[in-house]
Amino acid sequence: MNDMTLDHPVAKPIQTAKIEFWAATAIFVFAIFSLSTSDEPYRWDFEEAGIHYRFYKHHFWPQLIRYTLLYLGFLLLNFRIIPKLMQKQNVALYSLMLLGLYLAYAFGAGVLDTYTKSYFINWNFPGEQDYGLIFQDSFRHALFLLLLVGIYTFIKYTGLYLLSNATAISARYRFVNRETLTAFIIWMVSVFVLMVFDIDQDITVTLGILSLCALMLYCGAYYYLIPNALRSKKPLRKYLLVSLLVVILAYLPVTFLLLPFFHDEDNAFGLSFFNSLFQLVVTAPFVWFLFKRQMKGREEMVVLKKELGKTSANLDFLRSQINPHFLFNALNTLYGTALQENSERTAQGIQMLGDMMRFMLHENHQQKILLSREIEYMRNYIDLQLLRTSASPNISIETKIDDVVGDKYIAPMLLIPFIENAFKHGISLKHKSWIRISLHSEQDKIYFDVYNSKQKKSEQDPEKDASGIGLINVRQRLNLLYPDRHDLIIRDTPEEFFVHLTLQL
């Protein structure tokens, strides 16, 4: 967790530039379209002031110029001035540009308002007071727009900072993840949009408080209330009771939070009560449903990953078992035996090889087979190898494999890799070598030991430096198929190799 570091909020290039540009352009085009299709606003005010109203002079052209100034000013602020100020590059220059842009728009808006608000001016006695009020309003409006841009900038950079550092923040605070951060950013943007469109204050405060309380209840319930409730016998009832307690405790704090926004205290208390009821009836059950659904999805994902791991392991195991080196040795043995005698040994060898191939092609695809069939395959393998090694006095092979009593099942070809590894690395027709194999079953447990000598590979042996995937694969299969139900001990020295496996079937 100490390796998790937070990125600077403006260290990375802004990836939202294209989205912002096209969103601003779309709003600009929509505003022009609305302007061209609008009625004649303020006509009554003009006529009451005794001024002949002209749609293009008093509304269309001034508003078109205003929208264009707003659009160009936003692009200049958002993509040029603010990023440079955030990065502290030429602060004095870009601060002057910011001030100049503010003054230019405020003055331009004031000039345009002399057309759109001509009814405000007493044309019989026009004076500085009329123009002064118009320009005061334009400067105040320009300052308000600049404040909105500042709020938007704060939301944008805060959102980018939180999302880019979601992993590091989650490592420090468990209840904070990408989904929570995204929801918080959506909340900030929603409140900002309500402010931009000048929605009624009561509606803005109501929606803002409801959504913020819902977000806080989601975080608390998802990471604390529900996990603790699942430990009880009746988790849903306990979760709802605890949620009710939380909502009751939050009633007064929410009320005090609402009081500054409402002149009437009854409205604040009433809205707080509605918020409590909403969180208890809507938010709490929804979070429970969402948690259970995601938990089910995670369980299904774990099962799928496990099945995928089994499939991959079995596929790798099949590839590792089709060992050309062994097959060629077996065929050469049978060929040499056939040259020596036309006897039962040849037929026996061919029959054992056929049984083994049938086992690999058919039963090896099953998830579980009888332990007796696995042992039969092992014996066929050992007997086939004995045909090759029985003529050498330097080779000693001892086996003690008990017969299985009852129907016991095991994953196919789980034990043979150890035996194959022993014959592959422990037998030499030129040097003294030995293998000892034992298998004992007791109730639902089996005890399996393979003990063999090790022989140095010649420089011409193509498998001299090859480690193979047999033992690696069998470790993986044991972990997947028998987690916490097996004990595998491997001891490897320059002279000998020992394997002990205890397996709970």
Image: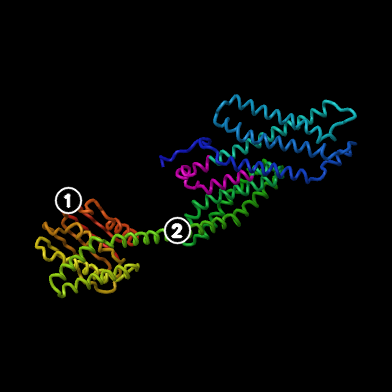
Q: Does the stretch in magenta take in 321? A: no
Q: Which residue carries the number 2 mark? A: 301
Asked if residue 168 is among those painted magenta in the image, a careful observer would answer yes
Circle 1 crowding by C-alpha within 10 Å: few under 14, some 14–19, many from 20: few
Q: Which mark is residue 494?
A: 1
Q: Is residue 208 above or below residue 92?
A: below
Residue 148 lies, with reference to residue 325, above or below; the image says above
Residue type at mark 1: give it.
Pro
Secondary structure character of the magenta stretch overall = helix
- Give percent across and percent down for residue 222: 51, 52
| Viewer-nearest of discs 2 and 1 | 1
- Residue 288 coordinates in the image, percent (x, y): 53, 57
Dot 2: element = helix
Q: How dense is the environment of label 2, judged by Cα within 10 Å: few (below 14), some, or many (20 and up)?
A: few
- Foreground residue among 173 and 376: 376
Q: Which residues are magenta?
A: 161-190
Side (left or right) of 156 relative to 263: left
Q: Is residue 77 above or below residue 470?
A: above
Quadrant housing residue 360: bottom left
Q: Amino acid at mark 2?
A: Met
Q: Quadrant of the N terminus?
A: top left
Q: Work out whether residue 484 can be spotted.
A: no
